[in-house]
Amino acid sequence: MCGGVGSRFWPFSRNDRPKQFLDFFGTGKSLLQLTVERISSVVRPENIILVTNRQYAEIIKEQLPEIKESNILLEPARRNTAPCICWAAHHIHALDPEASIVTLPSDHLVLKEKEFEKAIREGLEFVENGNRLLTLGINPTGPNTGYGYIQQGTAVESYPGIRKVKSFTEKPDLEMANVFIASGEFFWNSGIFLWSADSILKAFDKYDPETAHLFSSAEPNTFGTPEEPAFIDNIFPNAPSISIDYAIMEKADNVFVKTVDLGWSDLGTWNALYEASPRNHEGNVTQNCKVLTSECTGSMFAVSGDKIIVAAGLKDYIVADNGNALLIYPIADEQKIRQIVNEVKTRFGEEYV
């Protein structure tokens, strides 16, 4: 899934080049390229399907020339993850009714790649032996309100580390997140899902009939043929904008969690990037830029181009300069950045977002 705009990473993540297409760690590879490289140890390139917004087609072809064009599914509108996944499942099912699917966000950080490969292989074996929806669960390090939370239930015999999910809560408020952490029964939802094409389509039929009906309205033999893009262009803008978490995972009774230690971060915010990055003796992070600081602590500095940052007296701040926008904002208030981007767009125009 690589069609999001990543507005919480503004001003680096922009509408015309969101964060999944950026090289955040100076590796010479974007987050999307790293994701494709990571899953290639399990899935052959000809079986990797990318779902994105139409405006990013050329960026994807540029960054991933090894992916054939027919494997890039282009959404005509943004409708969150449930319609994205439903379309991909129909497309894959048409190509191979027996297919199993690993559903991956394109912008996550995974440091332990061998553990990732092992978890995916074990997870695929699990979902291929029953009507099961599996998510990978991460041990929480604090009451983060940006993640979904999975309450573990009973263990599954013969599958170490996999448990039935007792409850699934998408992005609770801070009070509830604290309750979850205190209980010791909850994991973060990584947003990495495994299921068979058949199982996830059955789940849509049962729990999200509105989305299911829209895609099932296709004439026979539409998916996986030259008729598919025109059908999608016609119906996709009518799809409800809903996440897979709300549409399916909170409702389904066949959801399981595999607990993993992957060195994982969803890199959804500046603070997530701060936590995943090396810091100097003052606790500051600099992202590929020159910085001269005095009495600055716990802050994040990111500037594009050959520009020097000189700062004094900042404590726990984000300083991000890219193109025609400069952000100077408390890390503690970073959840408001998405709202700020909307305000910038309204007051000053599209060119600033």
Image: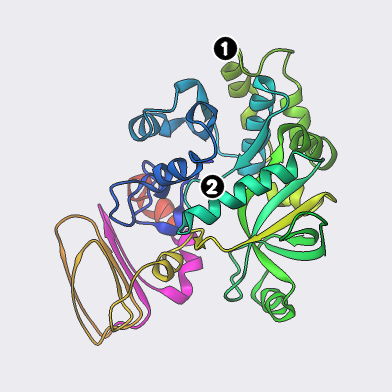
Disc number at residue 226?
A: 1
Q: Is residue 89 magenta?
A: no
What kind of residue is marked 2?
Pro
- How crowded pointer 2 is (Cα within 10 Å; few <14, some 14-19, many 20+) is rated as some
* SS for callout 1: loop
Indicate which disc residue 184 carries: none
Q: Is residue 328 magenta?
A: yes
Between disc 2 and disc 1, whose residue precedes? Answer: 2
Asked if 100 appears above or below 228 in the picture, the reply is below
Residue 78 image position (x, y, % from top left): 56, 39
Colour mapping: rainbow
**Residue at 42 percent of width and 29 percent of height:** 57
Tell which of 75 and 87 is nearer to you: 87
Horizontal side, residue 29 vs residue 167: left or right: left
Residue 80 at x, y = what percent?
Answer: 60, 43
In this image, 282 relative to 53: left or right? left
Residue 143, position as x, y percentages in the image: 61, 75
Q: Which mark's residue is nearer the viewer, 2 or 1?
A: 2
Disc 2 element:
loop
x, y percent for residue 44: 51, 31
Say few, some or many: other residues with alpha carbon within 10 Å of mark 1 (under 14 / 14 to 19 / 20 or more): few
Q: Which residues lie in the magenta part?
A: 314-340
Residue 105's disc number:
2
Number of marks present in the image shown: 2
Name the image quarter holding the N terminus.
top right
